[in-house]
Image: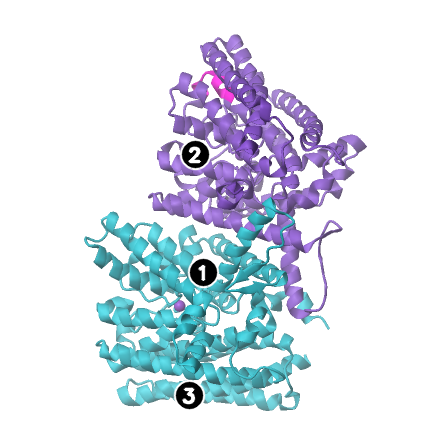
Chain colours: A cyan, B purple
Amino acid sequence: MRALLSVMNVLGYLLMVSSLTYLLPIICALIYQDGTLFTFVISLIACLAVGSAITLATHKYRTELKARDGFILVTLSWVLISAIATVPLMLHSHMSFTDAFFEMMSGLTTTGATVMVGLDTLAPSINLWRHAISWLGGMGIIVLAVAILPMLGVGGMQLFRAEVPGPIKDAKLTARIADTAAVLWVIYLVLTLACIIGLWLAGMSWFDAICHAFVALSLSGFSTRDASVGAFDSPIIEAVLIFFMVLAALNFATHFTVWRDRSLKAYWRDTEARGVFAVLFFSCIGCAAYLWFNDVYASFWTALRFVSFNLVSIATDCGFVNTDYALWPTFVPFWMLFLSSITASSGSTGGGIKMIRTLILVRQSGRELTRLLHPAMAAPVTVGGMIIPNSVVVAILGFIFLYFMSIVAMTFLLIFGGLDFISALTAVIACINNAGPGLGVVGPATNYGSLTDFETWVLSFTMLLGRLEVFSLLILFTPMFWRK
Amino acid sequence: MRALLSVMNVLGYLLMVSSLTYLLPIICALIYQDGTLFTFVISLIACLAVGSAITLATHKYRTELKARDGFILVTLSWVLISAIATVPLMLHSHMSFTDAFFEMMSGLTTTGATVMVGLDTLAPSINLWRHAISWLGGMGIIVLAVAILPMLGVGGMQLFRAEVPGPIKDAKLTARIADTAAVLWVIYLVLTLACIIGLWLAGMSWFDAICHAFVALSLSGFSTRDASVGAFDSPIIEAVLIFFMVLAALNFATHFTVWRDRSLKAYWRDTEARGVFAVLFFSCIGCAAYLWFNDVYASFWTALRFVSFNLVSIATDCGFVNTDYALWPTFVPFWMLFLSSITASSGSTGGGIKMIRTLILVRQSGRELTRLLHPAMAAPVTVGGMIIPNSVVVAILGFIFLYFMSIVAMTFLLIFGGLDFISALTAVIACINNAGPGLGVVGPATNYGSLTDFETWVLSFTMLLGRLEVFSLLILFTPMFWRK
Ligand SMILES: [K+]
Ligand SMILES: [K+]
């Protein structure tokens, strides 16, 4: 109980800091005069008030957090910030709390699945709000993935603690996280600015450029248009977005190294980055050829344009679309969803099991085969020249198992409620990977608006499950966690 | 090369021994005068001739086999016996080699997926042949699962070597396998005879009783009727079959202990058996209630009758059906397919990842959660009071990963070829688990006859992959295996 109060204290601060995000739609409302000013001012005040109230009420419990408290903190952060962020949607757009919470959780987990239609005619400030919450979620996940989860030892990532930039040794938990965060957020901000300028040069309005840059770098994939990026029908805009989506799917610690060394070599030395490039390159070529052979597109190059954009977008867990790829032969959309599970790097804003775990699993499978033939041969798993201890391999295999079982369990929950199998399975995969669009009734040409309240809540939970790497959320449901 | 020739020598003997199976349809042809006598005599001679030729040609390479040779032996046994068993189907029923090979591989791997229609009017000897090959496959898998795979250390089963009945210490490889086999086959034979009598008492003809007992104990699930067990429409027959399907899904080493101790306590002491009972019991009650609430059946008891038979049949990987359960709400058929992956015991004739691995995985997931909270706490995984070494946990997790990836890869291969997703996924799951019917175009009311040759070969491979526990087959495709 005492620990919970200490966590609430930090959470109150986080709410107060996150209330800065409300300034963006407020500025937007002043410029566009879209009638949302009052809504966002009220919302800002509400957020600040809740934050300060919590902080003040728990002031005397302020203390250094233990690693264990981190699990409560991350879960409550995502839940509370999403819950409070629903206020503008409920006030202005009259959405139900269920839908508004899904939309905000989708933004904050950078899933980018939407239940809203008529985006093209929505008040600009409300659109910006969805994108700003995504951008905030991207900031959160970078720190979570690079600093917090490795420290908590979630899913075998403890190995990669040492790669975190900034002073680590002997620093206190919160100070350590703050230092790391500051460095990575500067990189995130600079890349976002570069993307805004790139999109504007490619022909977007400043408003669209800002919104789409926010969700390209956070790999959220919301859009200001119902037709997503397809509404712009511009290969140049697509190229700019592909470039920044791939950057966002790499480890931000690697971007830091590139910036520190003033050399691109770090990308090549990063085993994960090589994996991401290889998977995306060969998948794009292969799938484009497949569509061309199947006469979906008359020319290979047209096929390559559409495959590159949609495949990179889904594989990196961004979720922009520029055509209804659900109409393509089944193989390609399912391959894209499969890639959404394995492609993004650790320490990126993407989701899924992450490239590093994929690589370790492939090596581990090879080792199991070797062990069958040469039981005595001690062959440790190595990735990028680094020996992976057995305990980490076990943790990673355990993570994958829980990840797979979560997909199975959530899919069963949805079909238990009556949803058809393909919609259920693909919605769960798209949500747990924080990718966005699925297939069936939640396909690229539609959205999550047709789902029942039950289905909406299940998927809100699934998005959070994926974002917090399964373990961090599930552990709160064990009796063990709350004992003593 | 020398090793391969030694393996061929054993294989020749196996072919000669397996040619005894041809005596069953020959006797049947004499009784029923169904015009297949000549076909089966020719086939018997062919099988004997190939077997003796191989044995004689490799006579001077006869030697004790090494563990490594076991992988070639098991794969070649299943492939060659299936290939030669196609002769009667091609001669009498004029089936293509692709279809006949699928049918025989389906029998020998005890998958029970069929490409044949008009079973009700088929020559009795041909029907008996399909069932006899399944029964032979059941004999093969018991020895494979109880004696050979644990010895080869496949998928973490090395731990359970010690449970094998019969003299183990200091015995040579082949002698050890032969001793174990003899004991287990007597149990298999006795249970089959009991099942034949049970089915006859329940009202089947002797012919149908023999055929269905063969495939109940081997959990193959072929039938002499297109409508499978639904053609008999008898709750008593269904009850008898449920009883023997559950027995066949338990470890035959446990049956041995029960017989030796003259006490049923061994079933209760067997952690896996308890798991099987629990999973089947609660799933039947739950799914029957679900169908009743969804108004699929007017009474709970009717729902329970149909759920019990079809669910137990699919979960144990037998594959009998008595109604078109594909018409039920999606949740139930998919739950049945999910159970087909996890329910059957090790050392049974069922397939999938096996109950013991399921249990170890559940414990291991719990341990990972504990480890996050108490990193220093050394909590080994235990199942049934036995401590599972970490190396075994890693091997089991590795097995599950390869098993899942095989499902993913084979599903992609099928949808790459143009099959719809649900048919592809469920066909692969049903085949890799050696369960039988899937959904979609391979559902319980149809069969695998509509598939293209490409799809048929992919699924023949998938059945073998599942039967040989993935590793034993995949290892043959590594360059490492063939080096030196
Ligand atoms: K996304
Ligand atoms: K079967």
Picture residue at 52% right of the left edge, 49% below the top: B402
* Location of residue A248 in the rendering, given as x and y in whole percent from the top left corner: 39, 72
| Above or below: residue B322 compared with residue A279 | above
Do the residues under discs 3 and 2 have CB atoms within 8 angstroms? Answer: no
Q: Nearer the viewer, mark 1 or mark 3?
A: 1
In the image, the segment drawn in magenta is: B120-129
- Which quadrant of the render holds ligand 1? bottom left
Question: Where residue B465 sits: x, y (%)?
Answer: 51, 40
The type of residue carrying mark 1 is Ile
Query: Image quadrant for the C terminus of chain A?
Result: bottom right
The residue wearing badge 3 is A42
Taking B126 as reference, is A373 left or right?
right
Residue at 80%, 33% (x, y): give it: B261
Q: How far apart are marks 1 and 3 (CA)?
A: 41 Å
Q: State which tag comes first along the sequence, 1 or 3.
A: 3
Q: Which chain carries label 1?
A: A
* Front label number (1 vs 2): 1
Q: Badge 2 sits on which subunit?
A: B
Residue A225 relative to residue A165: left or right = left
Q: What residue type is labelled 3?
A: Ile
Amino acid type for the residue under numbered disc 2: Ala
Using the image, name the chain to which the residue with label 3 belongs.
A
Secondary element at tag 2: loop
Verify CB contact (< 8 Å) between mark 1 and mark 2: no
Q: Residues within 10 Å of mark 2 (few under 14, many from 20)?
A: many
Disc marking residue A342: 1
Q: Name the residue under label 2.
A: B445
| Quarter of the N terminus of chain A within the rendering | bottom right
Give me the C-alpha separation between circle 1 and circle 2.
Answer: 36 Å
